[in-house]
Image (tube, grey):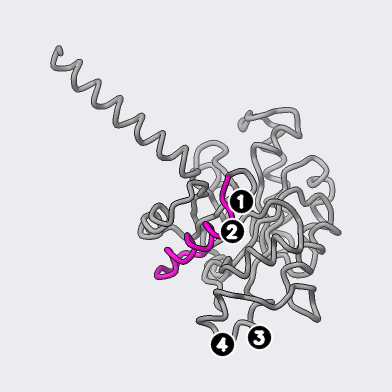
């Protein structure tokens, strides 16, 4: 197994991706042609099931984009299933302590490092070296989204094997009492804390959804930047096109 996203991050690159919840392999395939670095398949807050995610990962397998799955919870079976259908990384929600991070790592690794059960249906079809490389190449990405996670951040990022974390801006701002106030000094301080702590321990900070201008996220030092979700991007683009069309009609006095 070769994790291209991990290699990009280790070269110091800032990477960009989108989150998918629309269960269409065709949507995934189209987005994989754009030059994005990763796609996150969101099983936590959408209706995506394992069979659909597998078909979507298959649809992008011709490309070099990295498939990430956000699982429903920090659960052995759910993490195993996501990896067995081809995820190169898992985002694990509500990781609030070092013990939570270590649990996610154990669930994602084969013995002796972990307790992942053998059964990589898709990866093993193409990769005879999967068993030897998976423990090093699979990325486990805790989601930092609560005030408690901030308090225990040092323990989370220093869990052996953690290479990246994702800030969940909606839930983190909610937990801090400044919901969606991404310009709030309290929220900005939290982001700076995550970035500086990650940097101190050679861990890569990510942002799971837009939280202000992308330029600011780059300046803050975020290395995995999610540009948006499929539903929001679809609606936003349609709204812009509709507005432009109506403006053109009004300009002609019709």
For the point 50% across and 56% down, which residue is it?
39
**Residue at image mark 3:** 132
Which range is magenta? Answer: 47-66
Measured Cα–Cα span from mark 1 to mark 4:
28 Å
Q: Are marks 4 and 3 in contact (CB under 8 Å)?
A: no
Q: Position of residue 186 (x, y in %)?
A: 72, 33
For the point 43% across and 64% down, which residue is it?
60
Q: Quadrant of residue 114?
A: bottom right
Residue 50's label in the rendered image is 2
- Residue 103's place in the image compared with 197, above or below, is below
- Residue 14's place in the image compared with 240, above or below, is below
> Which mark is in front, 3 or 1?
1
**Closest to the observer: 12 or 96?**
96
Measured Cα–Cα span from mark 3 to mark 2:
25 Å
**Residue at image mark 1:** 43
Q: Residues within 10 Å of mark 1 (few under 14, many from 20)?
A: many
Q: Answer with mark 1 or mark 2, whichever residue precedes in sequence.
A: 1
């Amino acid at each position: 197994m070769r994790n291209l996203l991990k290699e990009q991050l280790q070269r110091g690159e800032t990477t960009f991706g989108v989150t998918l919840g629309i269960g269409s392999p065709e949507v995934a395939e189209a987005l994989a042609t754009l030059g994005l670095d990763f796609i996150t398949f969101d099983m936590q807050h959408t209706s995506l099931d394992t069979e659909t995610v597998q078909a979507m990962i298959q649809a992008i397998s011709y490309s070099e984009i990295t498939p990430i799955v956000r699982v429903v919870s920090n659960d052995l079976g759910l993490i195993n299933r996501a990896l067995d259908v081809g995820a190169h990384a898992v985002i694990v929600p509500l990781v609030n302590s070092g013990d939570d991070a270590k649990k996610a790592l154990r669930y994602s690794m084969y013995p002796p490092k972990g307790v992942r059960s053998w059964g990589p249906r898709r990866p093993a079809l193409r990769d005879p070296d999967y068993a030897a490389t998976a423990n090093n190449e699979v990325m486990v990405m805790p989601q930092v989204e609560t005030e408690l996670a901030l308090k225990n951040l040092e323990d989370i990022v220093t869990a052996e094997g953690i290479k990246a974390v994702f800030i969940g801006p909606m839930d983190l701002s909610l937990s801090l009492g400044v919901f969606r106030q991404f310009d709030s000094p309290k929220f900005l301080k939290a982001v700076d804390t995550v970035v500086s702590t990650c940097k101190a321990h050679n861990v890569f900070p990510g942002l799971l959804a837009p939280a202000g201008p992308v330029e600011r996220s780059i300046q803050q030092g975020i290395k995995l930047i999610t540009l948006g979700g499929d539903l929001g991007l679809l609606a936003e683009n349609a709204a812009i096109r509709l507005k432009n069309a109506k403006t053109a009609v009004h300009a002609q006095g019709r």
